[in-house]
Image: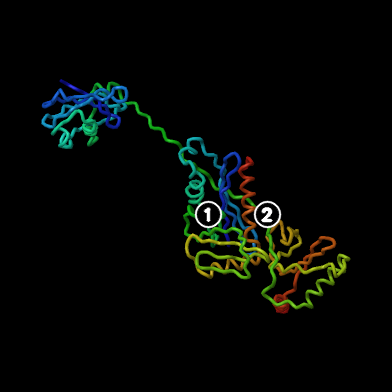
């Protein structure tokens, strides 16, 4: 009696033929064919398996060889067979001929009748180029509590007096809002306020930078900026002029 | 000089990366960017969630060294960008922090920089850096708002993605 089953190993279909040597037919029972395949392979280790490659599943032109290794079968499969035991069925089906190797041996001609026509497509990698653009000269400055040089109260008061004169405001409405370090000074620099932050915008990169003090007029909701003369810097420039 | 690096993704899924170099007075020195990248459907499938990281590291990040030659340190906003950038320069994530601190502090890899009077920024380096470098960045934060260039950089990249100039 011959049972056969088509085993699927990866993408290769194999047919395995094996004669049964010892079998107690009285004890055979089949699994419910509604749920599982009705075909089984019962393999006797004493027989050499005859494995045919019936459908390689390869594309034309691809090569493969299937090597069977019957000696990988567990010994308990054939010894003390009990076909009532469904676990035995599972054990038999677990034992499969496996593809041990793929070598560059041509498939039988029947599998490769046409010339190989294999096209490999790959998606193009993402490429980009680097560009450069001119940017506006903008710097945004936060107010700081103190400068690295010491500022006397007298200097602050002088600035307040100048603001009062220039903007015709009441001195009591003015409040000191902080210092701004290294503010660009040039004719083309446009100053604006972003809350307490000072925004300086210019068309070219300014060369002169000075510390400044900010004041807030609570009545008019206006802010004023006054540059601070740095005696040390001034002294240096005077010396340069003298030399 | 500080290099601000960002990868921008537009609403129509275009990507552009750029580096804004700021000098020690807070003035922009150069702005270099990549032409907008519009990944194909297959590229989106292949790269999946890693697409932005891939673009940041492999496409734009690899060109960082040639873009940001003058920058002493590269600043990024997103943590994922920090992880994927490969450059010999120090890279740090710089974000605003709610922590109020009277003075800046640093532990070798992370630090708090006081900005102005009422708020601060958290800086996290990808690897340990010297106290000297941190002090320098902290000092620059007194001269200009070190978080603000990110706003301009992203605005510029947004413009690049939306305009035909890219």
Q: Position of residue B34 (x, y in %)?
A: 56, 47
Q: Residue drawn at (48%, 46%), measured in percent from left and top?
A: B54
Using residue B141 as the reference point, say whether residue A6 is left or right of it.
Answer: left
> Which residue is the site of mark 2?
A136
Residue under label 1, please give it: B79
Q: Chain of mark 1?
A: B
Element type where label 2 sits in the image: loop
Residue B157 position (above or below residue B97): above
On screen, residue B165 above or below A21: below
Q: Is residue A115 left or right of residue A91?
A: right
Q: Is residue B16 positioned above or below A151 on the image?
A: above
The percent coordinates of residue B11 (x first, y second) are 61, 41
Question: Marks 1/2: CA distance?
Answer: 28 Å
Question: Looking at the image, which residue is at 61% across and 60% down?
Answer: B97
Mark 1 on the same chain as mark 2? no
A209 displayed left or right of B50? right
Residue A178, percent from left and from top: 73, 68
The chain to which mark 2 is attached is: A
Q: Quadrant of the C terminus of chain B?
A: top right
């Amino acid at each position: 009696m011959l049972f056969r089953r088509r085993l699927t190993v990866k993408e290769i279909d194999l047919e395995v033929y094996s004669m049964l040597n010892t079998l107690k037919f009285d004890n055979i029972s089949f699994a419910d064919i509604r749920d599982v395949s009705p075909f089984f392979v019962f393999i006797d280790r004493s027989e050499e398996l005859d494995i045919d490659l019936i459908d390689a599943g390869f594309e034309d032109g691809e090569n493969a060889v299937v090597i069977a290794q019957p000696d990988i079968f567990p010994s308990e499969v054939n010894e003390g067979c009990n076909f009532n035991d469904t676990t035995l069925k599972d054990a038999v089906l677990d034992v499969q001929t496996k593809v041990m190797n793929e070598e560059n041996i041509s498939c039988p001609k029947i599998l490769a009748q046409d010339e190989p026509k294999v096209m490999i497509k790959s998606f193009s990698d993402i490429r980009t180029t680097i560009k450069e653009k001119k940017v506006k000269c903008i710097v945004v400055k936060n107010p700081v509590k103190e400068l690295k040089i010491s500022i006397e109260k007298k200097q602050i008061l002088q600035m307040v007096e100048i603001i009062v004169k220039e903007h015709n405001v009441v001195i009591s409405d003015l409040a000191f809002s902080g210092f701004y370090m290294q503010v660009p000074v040039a004719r083309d620099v446009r100053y604006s306020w972003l809350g307490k932050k000072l925004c300086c915008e210019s068309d070219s990169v300014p060369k002169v930078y000075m510390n400044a003090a900010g004041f807030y007029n609570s009545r008019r909701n206006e802010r004023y900026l006054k540059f601070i003369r740095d005696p040390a810097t001034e002294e240096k420039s005077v010396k340069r002029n003298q030399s | 000089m500080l290099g601000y690096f960002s990868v921008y993704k537009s609403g129509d899924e275009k990507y552009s990366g750029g580096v804004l170099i700021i000098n020690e007075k807070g003035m922009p020195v150069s702005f270099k960017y990549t032409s907008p990248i519009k990944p194909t459907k297959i590229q989106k499938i292949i790269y999946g969630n890693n697409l932005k990281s891939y673009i940041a590291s492999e496409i734009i990040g690899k060109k960082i060294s040639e873009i940001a030659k003058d920058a002493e340190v590269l600043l990024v906003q997103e943590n994922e960008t920090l992880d994927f950038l490969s450059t010999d320069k120090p890279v740090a994530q710089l974000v605003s922090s709610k922590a109020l601190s009277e003075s800046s502090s640093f532990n070798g890899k992370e630090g708090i920089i006081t900005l102005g009077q009422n708020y601060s920024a958290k800086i996290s380096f990808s690897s340990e850096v010297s106290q000297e470098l941190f002090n320098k960045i902290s000092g620059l934060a007194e001269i200009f708002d070190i978080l603000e260039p990110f706003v301009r950089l992203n605005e510029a990249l947004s413009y690049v993605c939306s305009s035909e100039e890219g």
